[in-house]
Amino acid sequence: MPRIAREARPGRLWSSVAARPLWLDTARPRSFALRDMNPWLTVSASDYEGHMIAAGQLGALSAIFRDVYLEQRPRRLAVLGCATGKGFEHIESSVTEHVIGVGSTRPI
């Protein structure tokens, strides 16, 4: 069997069957989807908020959001990882015209 030299590069995954990157291995069966691997999709909003309250993080994150928002006073705002939107009560509609919130939990 011929030896195959493979150069190790950060961010590259190699198939154990051939010296080809996994994203080029079209014969490899796909038994899962990446969305199925996201553990946040199994946590309900009420469980998340319960944990955040018990850990004392919900109020802290809301206060941090409020402080940064009042300092910046953006006309447009995008929040990645907004979960259930706690802290959005600090948004002033007279200041901020457009708000986009992206959460990673499943819809309820």
Image (spheres, helix red, strand yellow):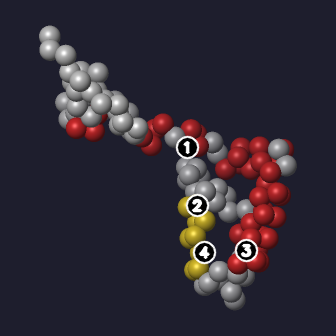
Identity of the residue drawn at 73% across and 74% down: 69
Disc 2 marks which residue? 80
Q: Which residue sits at x=68%, y=86%? A: 95
Tell whether label 1 touches label 3 (CB within 8 Å): no
Q: Counting residues from the N terminus, which is met first, the one under dot 2 or under dot 1?
A: 1
The reply to whether the C-beta atoms of the residues labelled 3 and 2 are less than 8 Å apart is: no
Q: Are marks 1 and 4 in contact (CB under 8 Å)?
A: no
Q: Assess whether mark 2 and mark 4 are in contact (beta carbons under 8 angstroms).
A: no
Provide residue 6's location: percent of width, then percent of height.
27, 27
The answer to whether 100 appears left or right of 89 in the picture is left
Percent x, y for residue 99?
59, 75
Residue to which mark 1 is pinned: 41
The spot of residue 101 in percent (x, y) is: 58, 66
The residue shown at (56%, 38%) is 39
Q: Separation of disc 3 and disc 1 at Cα?
A: 28 Å
Please identify the residue farthest to the left as the structure is shown: 1
The three-letter code of the residue at mark 1 reads Leu
On-image quarter of the N terminus: top left
Marking on residue 77: 4
Amino acid identity at mark 2: Leu
Q: Quadrant of residue 25?
A: top left
Where residue 3 appears, as percent x and y from the top left, is 19, 16
Callout 4 environment at 10 Å: few (<14), some (14 to 19), or many (20+)?
some
Residue type highlighted by circle 3: Tyr
- Mark seen at residue 69: 3
Of the image marks 3 and 2, the number of the one nearer the N terminus = 3
**Label 1 environment density (alpha carbons within 10 Å; few <14, some 14–19, many ≥20):** some
Point out the frontmost of discs 1 and 4: 4
Q: For the image shown, how many numbered marks are present on the structure?
A: 4
Front-most of 12 and 37? 12
